[in-house]
Image (cartoon, rainbow, N blue to C red):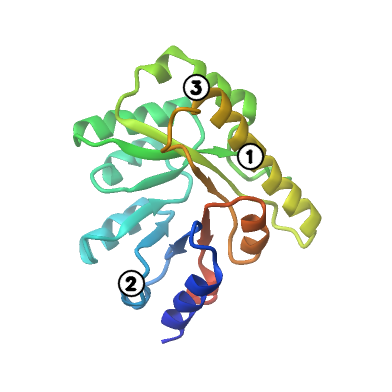
Amino acid sequence: MQIAKSITWLKKTIPENVGIVAVSKTKPASAIMQAYQAGQRIFGENRVQEVVLKQSQLASDIDWHFIGHLQTNKVRHIAPFISLIHGIDSMKLLSEVNREALKNNRIIDCLLQFYIATEETKFGLDITEAKAILESESYQQLKNIRITGVMGMSSFSDDLILVRREFRTLHDYFVTLKAQYFSQCSSFGHISMGMSGDYLIAIEEGSTLVRLGTIIFGDR
């Protein structure tokens, strides 16, 4: 019941133009169904084996987002059904997603993940690396992927000024890429940033997708 209440409250308080990705990693199917029955349709997972199992067990109209670090040798397992891959951080990974999407006769939506935090453990591109990918001949040959925006993770910090600055940096990257490479692409519109502890700041800084776990499902 608490999960349903949380979903209902979030949908009332978060702007309509901001999507909610319910981060369901480690949570059982029963918990996901409580959120689903409250109207939630987008769920985020960070382990391939887990999302494959849940996708086979749960409703077919769920949009599964992969929000973790994706290894190239695991792409084939999620390619048949995944709705959006948040963490594209290399040309190698993007090419592999394209290859597996082609096998499944699909076009898979992807976000470029940027490194915006101070911690050294975070994955992601810098703006120069992203431009190199988008300007490469190899990228131009990819017909079964569609880059629909950017993603980033802020520092795990109580310094809200720092967190806001990092979110603003990601928004600036989005604006730059939109202007230089995707000005004619209406599908390039996502900024995936913000989690349970900082999503309000992320929304203020332009987030269109917030990844919320604890605030929906409780502590892990």
- The amino acid type found where label 2 is placed reads Tyr
Of the residues tagged 2 and 1, which is closer to the observer? 2
Residue that carries the numbered disc 2 in the rendered image: 36
Inter-mark Cα distance, 1 to 3:
17 Å
Q: Is residue 35 above or below residue 132?
A: below
Of residues 140 and 157, the one drawn nearer to the viewer in this rendering: 140
Of residues 89 and 177, the one drawn nearer to the viewer in this rendering: 177
- The amino acid type found where label 1 is placed reads Tyr
Q: Is residue 153 shown left or right of residue 6?
A: right
Q: In which quarter of the image is residue 197?
A: bottom right
Q: In this view, does 143 lie above or below 113?
A: above
Image position, residue 220 (x, y; %) = 52, 72
Residue that carries the numbered disc 3 in the rendered image: 134
Residue that carries the numbered disc 1 in the rendered image: 115
| SS of the residue under disc 3 | helix
| SS of the residue under disc 1 | loop
Inter-mark Cα distance, 2 to 3:
36 Å
